[in-house]
Image (cartoon, helix red, strand yellow):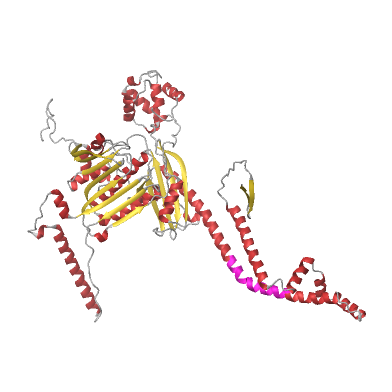
Amino acid sequence: MPPKAKAPAAGAKGDKALQSKSPAQFFADNKNIAGFDNPGKSLYTTVREFVENSLDSAETIGELPNVELSIEEIDKAAYDKTMGLDQLERKDESIYRDVLEAQKQQEKIDKEAKKAQAKNAKEGAGGATQKAVTGTKPKDRTGIFRVTCKDNGQGMHHKDVPNMLGRVLSGTKYGVKQTRGKFGLGAKMALLWSKMSTGLPVTVRTARQKQDFISVYTLDIDIHKNEPNIHKEEKLPNPDKWHGAELSVTIEGNWSTYGFQVLKYLRQLAVITPYANFQFKFTGVDESKSKAVTFRRRTDWMPAPPAETKHHPSSVNIELLKTLRDTTKTSNLLQFLNKEFTSIGREYASRLIGELGEELEPDTSIKEVSDKQVVRIHQLLRAAHFDPPDGDCLSPAGEYNLRLGIMKELRPTMVATCNAGVAIHEGNPFVVEAGVSLGGKSVPTGLTVFRYANRIPLLFEGGNDVATRTAGKLKWDAYKIDPNRDRVGIFVSIVSTKIPFKGTSKEYIGEDATTMAESVQQALRLCALQLKTKLVRAQAAKDRKERKKVLYRYIPDVARAVFGVLQETAAKGKSTRSMLKGDDSHAPAKRRRQVSSLESDNEDADMAGLSDEEDGVLERVSNGLVKEETLANKLTTFIDQLDGDQALDLAMKMSTTKEDVFLSARKAQLGQELHTPTCVMTLIA
């Protein structure tokens, strides 16, 4: 029996293998959780974080964002020169990866060529031309890229630049507020990736509003200490009073595989922020691959910046309660509950304190509340009922901006938008805005879902997202939309003080967020209902057009036939009237016999029974005032009028969405009246 292990003696040293990591080192070792999975994804994520920081910075001060983004490919010789490395010749080609990959590629091509030759010989295709065998496309290679992003935002204070960019988990976006970033990583992860992949620091130029100098820094991050490492610091004159920030970082990336994603991201971002102006330029080593794209501003209306709010009682945990207790500026428990939380008035706070037992009173000093009592307060907050928080702190894009962005970038034939209103998820308010478009450019057949969270596009892992899952379950056929044949664009934007992302990469929202799923479903249904009304009206208009086309086709034949009848009738009527009103004085008896014969004839009796108006028509036909063309024009007018009346009647029947229209009376002189088939409008002079 093996001997029992002895317990370590008191005071003995701990395990020498026990280590601790700084936040920077942790995220450097686990960069994939922040979206830096590979060189290509790292290039995309760097662009995304830079652009989103620029938008936040400009919107904070109420400036319409102007974002200039450039990606410059750097060849190996230029990079080596920057690093001070001499060019070396290869001595052993067999140890290099590109040589081995080329050999494997050639072997594969030769193998496929032999198979093709054997197949041709077996089929006896004498004289047949053999297809060229080119093999598969070689794998895309990574390269070095300089990413530069410039904006017109609020800029950074000179002394804050090192900590804002060189210290992981430090930032200004913490708190209960809707923001595009939530983890204090963003640009700092780009700096970490730059340090790990190229070893080059970041260059920063920034200035505040009305500041007479520009702060310039060159720095990187000390990964082990999680501290900024400043290489260069200076202040330059700012005669133009420029404000904003310009960041330039050199990283390893892969444009050939993720360049499409970068352009897709910018295009979708232009949909949700049509008030921003984006200028993008890619410069490749091969100039033929360079490109420049501009997404121009289409409106000057920008949503109000989101406001910071307080915690909702149902969303706090024990540790957060302790932190609020230690940092609050309130003096007693009543003020603490009333001032530090939403949805708790003074009267309700007193009622809550009454449920905490005799140990706690409304005037109990908040600093005297123990950790055990904090647990009791937390239990009460979890069990009590509170009014939901309002959505005044949120800043959705707005239906106008969403619709404008969709029309600007996709140019659909139809579009409908909807705001589902404020709802609550785990004590945090959120708003779902949705849009559904039909047709348009670059939209494939079927359902294409565009997802946004706090007004940023989500491009990856869309199959698991609440918007994709909800859209797939909706019965589109009930709304006259064919999800398999129609080109349907589905836009879902969710804004909240806390987006329940799955993972720190912020790529999708899980379907288990049931309240969000319900709001998404409601918004999409309302959009689909709007489109159904439009589609029914469009189909009715199409049917009317086809019916008019058929009726127009018969107008010449009908006009010709009717005019022939009128001519014949007019001729008979003229003969009858001449006999009735003739003045042959030499044969009165004979004329009386003719009149008696006419009265006995049924056809001529009908002629005698015509009204004055009908008789006038026959007379105009006889005089040549009414022609076949006249009848054709009258029939055309009648068809047009009939079609307009039917369209109005259909519109009244199909009007499912009724909105109140309020017209305020104005004391002004009234002018000319305009008459239409549906109403009379009086102009104000």
Instruction: Inspect the magenta stretch and tell me whether residue 553 lies in it.
Output: yes
Instruction: Inspect the magenta stretch and tell me whether residue 352 lies in it.
Output: no
Task: Out of 277 and 573, give the one closest to the viewer.
Answer: 277
Q: For the point 83% across and 76% down, which residue is it? A: 578
Query: Can you tell which quarter of the image residue 62 is in?
Result: top left
| Residues drawn in magenta | 547-566
Task: Out of 498 and 397, give the one closest to the viewer.
Answer: 397
**Could you say where residue 658 lies in the image, as x and y percent from the top left?**
57, 47
Q: Main structural element of the magenta stretch: helix, strand or loop? A: helix
Query: Can you tell which quarter of the image residue 629 is in?
Result: bottom right
- The answer, for residue 492, to whether it is visible in the render is yes
- The answer, for residue 30, to whether it is visible in the render is no
Residue 78 position (above or below residue 587): above
**Could you say where residue 543 lies in the image, as x and y percent from the top left?**
56, 63
* Residue farthest front in this picture: 239
- Left or right: where does residue 462 sit relative to residue 348? left
For the N terminus, the image quarter is top left
